[in-house]
Image: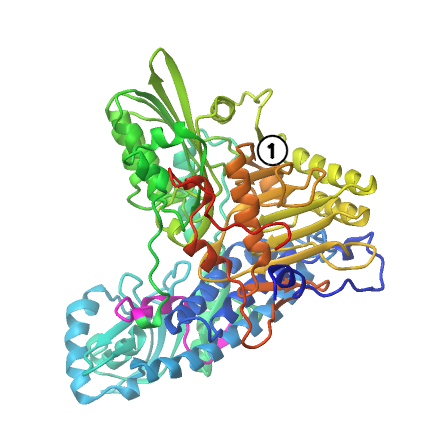
Amino acid sequence: MTNADFLKAPFPDPVEIPGDFSGPSRFYNRELSWIGFNWRVLEEAENTRVPLLERLRFLSISATNLDEFYTVRVAGLRELAREGNTMPAADGLSPAEQLVLIDEEARRLLSRQQTVLEDLRALMEAEEISILSAGDVTKADLAHLKAVFLAEVFPVLTPLAIDPAHPFPFLPNEGFALALQLERQADKRPLQALLPVPHQIDRFVSLPAASGHRFLPLEELLLLNLESLFPGYKLKGHCAFRVLRDSDLEVEDEAEDLVREFETALKRRRRGEVVRMKISAGAPGALRRVIMEELPVNEEEVVEVDGLIGIADLSELVLDSRPDLLWTPFTPRVPERVQDHDGDMFAAIRQKDMLLHHPYETFDMVIRFLQQAARDPDVVAIKQTLYRTSKRSPIVDALCEAAEDGKSVTALVELKARFDEAANILQSRRLERSGAHVIYGFLNYKTHAKISVVVRREGDRLVTYTHYGTGNYHPITARIYTDLSLFTCDAALGRDATKVFNYVGGYAEPQQLENLSISPISLKPTLLERIAAEAEAARAGRPAAIWAKMNSLIESEVIDALYAASQAGVQISLVVRGICGLRPGIKGLSENIRVKSIVGRFLEHSRIVCFANGSALPSHKARVYMSSADWMGRNLNRRVETLVEITNKTVKAQIMSQIMAANMADVAQSWVMGPDGRFTRAKWPEGEFAFNCHRFFMENPSLSGRGSAGASDVPQLTHTEV
């Protein structure tokens, strides 16, 4: 079977579906599409081709994803529904109607998570990794657990009575607690109490084992040691419960001090209304009622869990000590060209543009670029966007070092990076103390662009070195996210980057960008213009095609443009990891559009688009772009994002004939979207080879990172193969 077969085989023929697709039915619901993505994540936990503990990690990720979905998206829809807002989404569903469908699908997903966990527990048991319950603990274990409890847990606990003299305590977002029914042994007097389970302690307590690993959930340890917390009382009944709160941030439009306002908003988030509560199935009725009344929550917001509450915590059990149950170790490559120049990033970039494909090429090159800039006496200025960073970021370290050395350093810190606001506030304070000039961009727009600019004095002129990325400047997520890093000293791209910083810092709208489009100004118009040009080429009988890769596609104007291009005859192939509101493969609407999702070892995160421009893809005539933006309303209309046109021939070939072609040819990790919005796993005959793009990238270096050996021996997928 050829790669051409791989590309065609998983996609069904276009179908005729009765209905009027000029209205809302031409879109698939955003929220249901997101849940569909999380189903794909969960199904990787069931995939027997995935190592066992990696399957456990996928299960944990699916739980984390669902929690965040509820604290942000569902919380917002709930607020709209409560206010009586009936404004429909693009697909025609009102907030209230969406909430009903979300609840139904989410409950199915939660139930399936518990089933998958039970299957994995059995497989882990066979590998001598056990998750115990209190009934599995031996007498020898009890002595060990008592010592652990008194030394490591007891000092952190705060047991709380529930009665008129003790108001029901506040539980923060993701707060987990045991509710207890107790009876005083002396006089049979009842007592209701709450025991918050501290998140500062590992969820799973390790027990001694002759071989293998044994773990007891922390809540089970607490139940075994209640006599230390409530001496003289007997346990009559109990349950566990966990709350999710509205975590969307609201910031006053006229905030004079943006940092202070965000610090206040973060405190409000912590106390947001409860949007969902999970509680042990079979909880005592009296405890259940008091919890619901005090939080407060209604029946629609309660989910009874027959199993483990807090599945996200299972990530603790992905054990480094069992490499046989994990992915085969992979060490990201250092580009040969950088090695040829003895690690000198500036010399490597001066030779020609260089595109790195993370995590296959190490993100350390981005860090090295900034560290060298900080220590280079010829560097006069550094400008850097920071959307998400690690807690102890080497990039922030380099910026601080440069500022303290007297270089001009400008850091554009995005305070509105969801769930990273607190970390970014700390980083901004640190940068300011070092002498860097910190700007926060627009109040109404997030700055999501990924740009780094280094200005270096070389002889009698200043040379601008620029890095454009599709991912965050985050060395930890860069190990698992697939992203692109373009390094260039092209003067036009340097000027464009400088204009973006001037725009965000001074509100002056940039004029005459040369190789760059930005939202909210020109990015969407550029996409629509290029899509329309492909449609015109198809109508004129010329080759017309679009390849695009992104995380989400829901912007209605762009979807309609793709529908129009399909109807004109443009062949459109999309790789959409997560949300997709476009419905492919419908005759008369989208019969020339194919959509797939790749879910595997690495998280697909890069954004790429290739337009045929009068020749079959891949071709040197194509117009190729990399971007920080997904095709969503927020990215194209309400954020500062970048769309960089690639003009370097080698980089262009790398993106089309290597990265995109491999994504299109992937079968092993691909899911195919049908007209109904549902994805099904791509199938291949038993025993046949199934192309895996992640494996291909791990085994083959990037074209533009090749050094003196050249790129001629680097595998590419040609037009005839793809």
Q: Residue 213: where, in percent of width, then height?
A: 25, 77
With 666 as the anchor, is 57 left or right in this view?
left
Judge whether residue 319 is colored magenta: yes
Residue drawn at 33 percent across, 13 percent down? 459
With 281 as the anchor, is 611 left or right in this view?
right
Q: Which residues are magenta?
A: 303-323
Q: Quadrant of residue 30?
A: bottom right
With 110 as the anchor, is 10 left or right in this view?
right
Quarter that holds the N terminus: bottom right
Q: Nearer the viewer, residue 150 or 449?
A: 449
Q: Nearer the viewer, residue 136 or 229?
A: 136
Quarter that holds the C terminus: bottom right
- Looking at numbered disc 1 in the image, what kind of residue is underneath it? Pro
Judge whether residue 1 is colored magenta: no
Does residue 335 sit above or below 276 in this rendering?
above
Determine which residue is flagged by label 1.
520
Q: Residue 245: where, in percent of width, then height?
A: 47, 58
